[in-house]
Amino acid sequence: MSAPLFSAEGLAKRFGDRVLFDSARIDLEMGSGYVLTGINGSGKSTLLRIIAGLEPTQGGRLTFRAQASTVPDYPEAWRREIVYVHQQPYLFHTTIENNLEYGLARRGVLRVEREERTREALAWAGLAARSGVPPHKLSGGEAQRVALARAKALDPTLLLLDEPTANLDGDARKQVLELVTALCIENHTVVVASHDPEIIRLAILTRLQVSGRSIVVAD
Amino acid sequence: MDLFDPTRQAFSLLLNGDPELWRIIWVSLWVSVLAIAVMAPPCIAIGFVLAKRQFAGQRAVVVLLQALLSFPTVVIGLVIYLLLSRRGPLGAFELLFTPWAIMIGYMVIALPILVVFTVSAVQGADPRVYETARSLGAGPSRAALTTLWEVRFAVMAGIVNAFGRVVSEVGCALLVGGNIAGITRNIPTAIALETSKGEFAQGIALGFVLIVTAIGINVALAWLQGRGGLE
C-alpha cells in the first residue's frame, strides 16, 4: 500500500491538566472521506486544528505528501493545500466575492481566473443569487455555504470541516449536508468532525472515533 | 468684556486670508499630519505584535505604554529640549526651535496612543479572523494585515485620537519650537501668546479653526465607519 497523504504519529496534546491526546496516531489516505466522532470535549476540533497547523502540540510528528514536520514548524506550503473551516465560519467584512477570492489571491491566481472560480464556487453552493449581499446579512446556513464555497474554490488537497451542520436545522442543514457529501465524492480528502447522525451514516465516509486519548477506526 | 467685537474681527481675519494667520494654521497641520503619518505604520505593527505574541515582560510593556498615555506633554518637551539643545547629545543636528523639533515631540506623544489603541483593537478582534486568513493560505504578515483591516475602525480611532492630541498640544510645541512667528508658531502656541497679549481676535479665529478641524475629522471617521459596516 502506498504511503498515506497525511499522517500524524506520537501526537501529544494537553490543555493544562486535561490530556486530549497521548501518543495518538491518524492516517488519511488520498481521496478518502472521514468522519470524526466522539463525545464533546474529546478533542475532535483540536485534532482538526492540529492538522491545519492552527494549534501547537506538546509532541508528535506530522507527515504530508511524505514530507515530515513538527507542529511549531508547520510548513507554509502545506497551508496552500490544507484548508480548515470553523464550526461557525468567520466571513471577512467585505463582499461575498472578496471572501471567496481571498485564498485564491494568496495563491497568486490572476484576477480573471479568480472571478471565474468564484462564480463557479458560488453557483456550486447555490449562492449565485446572493451575490452582493454583505456577509453579516446572511443566515447561518448561507454563511456556512459561503465558507464551504470559499474552501472549495481553493481546490484543497485536504479539507477539514468542523461540525458543518451543528448550528443549522431544516433546509439549511439539508443544503449543507448535500454540499459536504458532494465535496466527499469529488475526490478531495475530507475530514468532517460531526455529531450529525446523517453525516456519520454516510457510506462514503470512514468513521474515526476520538476516545481514550487516541483515534480509532470505528467501523 | 465684549466678546462680539473680537469674534467679528476673527472671522474677518479668516475670510480675508490673513497670511500670518494662515501660515500658523499651515504649520500646525503639516507638522501634525506628518508626525502621525510617520508614526502610524510602525506603531500599529508594534501594537499588533504586543497583542498577539506572548513574551516575557509583555504585560509590563503594555502597562508602561498605558502610563505614557497620561504623561504630561510639557515634560516630553523638556526631555526633547535637553536632547536637542546645543550641548545635548543630539545638538549637532541643530533641530531645536525648528518645526522638526515639534514633529519629534508629536511623534513621542503619539506613540503610546497609537500602540495602545491598536493593542486593544487587536485583542478585541475575533480570533477566527487570523486563523481563517492563515488557513486560507495567508502568511503571518498578510494575516496580520487582514486582522488589522477587520478592526480598522478601532485602529483608526487611535489615529484620530493621536492627531487630536498633538494638534491641540501647547507645552511641548512651545518649549521645543519656541513659538517663532512664521516658522514654529502653530495654532495652540499662537492662541497662548495672543491671549496673554490681550489680542483675542486671532485667538478666537485660531480656536475656531482648531474646533472645526477636530469636528471635521470625527465626522469623517463616523462617515467611514458607516460605510465600512456596509449597512
Image: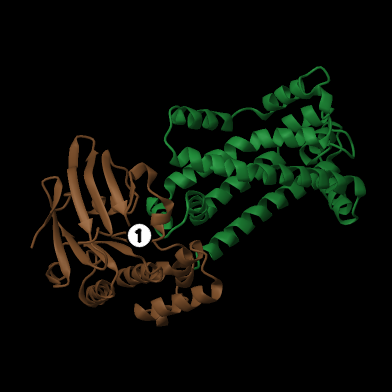
Chain colours: A brown, B green
Residue at coordinates 80% horizontally, 38% vertically from top-left? B191
The reply, left or right, for residue A195 in relation to residue B109 is left
When the figure is inspected, residue A164 is found, relative to residue A171, above or below; the finding is above
* Residue A141 percent location from the top left of the image: 30, 71
- Report which residue position mark 1 lands on: A82
Q: Secondary structure at mark 1?
A: strand
Q: Residue furthest top?
A: B87
Residue A47 seen from this side: yes
Of residue B188 and residue B178, the one placed in the foreground of this image is B178
When the figure is inspected, residue A53 is found, relative to residue A218, above or below; the finding is above
Q: Residue furthest front?
A: A1
When the figure is inspected, residue B38 is found, relative to residue A105, above or below; the finding is above
The reply, left or right, for residue A214 in relation to residue B167 is left
* Residue A98 percent location from the top left of the image: 49, 68
When the figure is inspected, residue B33 is found, relative to residue A190, above or below; the finding is above
* Residue B227 percent location from the top left of the image: 55, 65
Residue at coordinates 60% horizontally, 56% vertically from top-left? B221
Of residue A93 and residue B218, the one placed in the foreground of this image is A93
The reply, left or right, for residue B223 in relation to residue A73 is right
Residue at coordinates 49% horizontally, 50% vertically from top-left? B144
Residue at coordinates 78% horizontally, 27% vertically from top-left? B175
Rendered image quadrant of residue A128: bottom left
The amino acid sitting under disc 1 is Ile
Of residue B101 and residue A201, the one placed in the foreground of this image is A201
* Residue A178 percent location from the top left of the image: 24, 77
Residue A43 seen from this side: no
Q: Residue furthest left?
A: A219
Q: Mark 1, residues whose alpha carbon is within 10 Å: few (<14), some, or many (≥20)?
A: many
Chain for disc number 1: A
Of residue B187 and residue B31, the one placed in the foreground of this image is B31
Q: Quadrant of the N terminus of chain B?
A: top right
